[in-house]
Image (cartoon, helix red, strand yellow):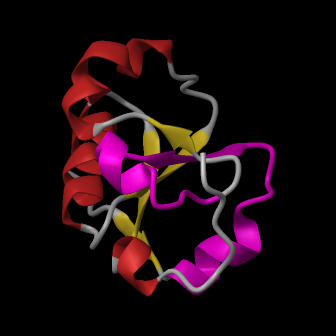
Amino acid sequence: MEDIKELSPEEVETIKENDNIQLIDVREDEEVAQGIIENALHIPLGDITDVYTDLDKEKEYIMICRSGRRSYNAAAFLQEQGFKVMNMSGGMLNWQGEIIIK
């Protein structure tokens, strides 16, 4: 299996407005309630295996969680299904950009 590309939060900040890139936050509801990156899609890690078929394989996905471990696992799963994925290293703990409260 190909290594999953890791992006720093700063790199994610500069490319998050790209129309062909979708951010996916895999944290739990209570974590997301504390703030999420604008335009990120919230799919809890436990739901990824149920909904991944709804995702567009033409897009690239940047996976996000609290520290980078769960998102890496989600990225590995999606990559195995043929998706183009990257992982935000350090997760939301290292995110310095704006967040929105839902």
Tell me if residue 98 comes above or below residue 73 in the rendering: below
24 on left or right of 38: left
Figure quadrant of residue 53: top left
Residue at 58%, 86% (x, y): give it. 96
Residue at 27% from the left image edge and 25% from the top image edge:
47
In this view, 32 is above or below 29: below
Q: Is residue 5 visible?
A: yes
> Magenta part of the protein: which range?
9-37
Does residue 2 show up?
Answer: no
Looking at this view, is 36 or 14 the one in front?
36
58 relative to 67 in the view: left or right: right
Image point (61%, 60%), residue name = 37
Instruction: Please check the rendered image and state whether residue 17 is part of the magenta-colored stretch, yes or no.
Output: yes
**Measured from the top left, where is residue 95 in percent x and y?**
51, 80
Q: Position of residue 61 (x, y in %)?
A: 52, 46
Give the quadrant of the C terminus.
Answer: top right
Instruction: Give the quadrant of residue 17.
Output: bottom right
